[in-house]
Image: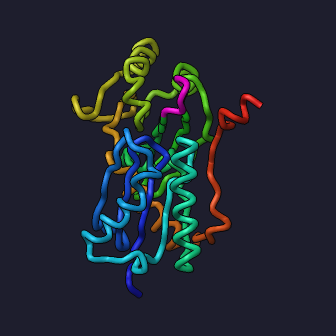
Amino acid sequence: MAEPFILSLETATLAGSIAVSRGPTILAKQVGRPDVSHSNTLLRDINEILSKLDLSIRDIDLFAVANGPGSFTGLRIGLATVKALATTLDRSCIGIPTLEAIAHSAGVADAIVALLPAGRGEVFVQMFSTEHGAVSASDSPQHLSPERAIDKYIDRAGILWAGEAAQLYSDLIQQRATSAGYRFAVADKQEVDSVNDAWIITVPALTLAEHVASLALVRAQAGLQTTANSLKAIYVRPSDAEMKA
């Protein structure tokens, strides 16, 4: 049986990204623009990336999308696009939690804390363990202040910190690591021989969609595809409108 063509979208972050893969092979990937709404560029970017591969949208066997948490508007755009395409073309789709994709991008480790900006100076946070492409959640996603998110894991010595918010709050993570007596390093600046007793900031993935693709393939091989009607967003926190109500 031929490996499936998968179109993967990540619109949970400001820039977002797109990837086209066939089985485990990423054929093409593209980063969006953080200063332009996904609603203005997503369909055009999909057409462009498919054209470069000499593919049409009808060649896609499976649609995958980061389904949250993340930007409310971005998530809705990505989910609506995948639902529309899957329904029109009678294809299956798969939702991949954004924080899970972030953890996958960090590599193999017993403890990876995925951190994503949540707006209003807060973050989405969740811990995972990874092994051979599989990602397992160690706890549930939460919406917290950066201080509370970091202190949640203060008793854990060896952690890879991953995601945009890990970079954004690297000084705070270093401060907490130092006060707890852990070694600290930034992966792209300093070699670290072991994470057993260190807190390490990992290099953020430029195209998170490729990790959405990898995780979607694992789910597809396990028969976990869903219909468009079953695809739901993971918001973690209520919207601003709901909080004001």
Foreground residue among 187 and 48: 48
Foreground residue among 183 and 73: 73
| Residue 154 in sight from this viewpoint | no
Foreground residue among 157 and 206: 206
In the image, 123: left or right of 228? Answer: left
Q: Is residue 102 above or below residue 202?
A: below
**Magenta region: which residues?**
117-121
Which quadrant of the view contains residue 35?
A: top left
Residue 183 locus on image (x, y percent): 35, 22
The answer to if 162 sits in the magenta stretch is: no
Rendered residue at 48%/36% (across/down): 116
Task: Determine the residue located farthest toward the right in the rendered image.
Answer: 245
Task: Determine the residue located farthest toward the front in the rendered image.
Answer: 40
Quarter of the picture holding the C terminus: top right
In the image, 162: left or right of 236? Answer: left
Rendered residue at 32%/70% (across/down): 50
Residue 223 locus on image (x, y percent): 57, 74
Specify the color scheme. Answer: rainbow
Q: Main secondary structure of the magenta part?
A: strand
Q: Is residue 239 above or below residue 78?
A: above
Quarter of the picture holding the N terminus: bottom left
| Residue 187 in sight from this viewpoint | yes
Which quadrant of the view contains residue 228?
A: bottom right
Residue 217 locus on image (x, y percent): 45, 68
Rendered residue at 49%/53% (across/down): 135
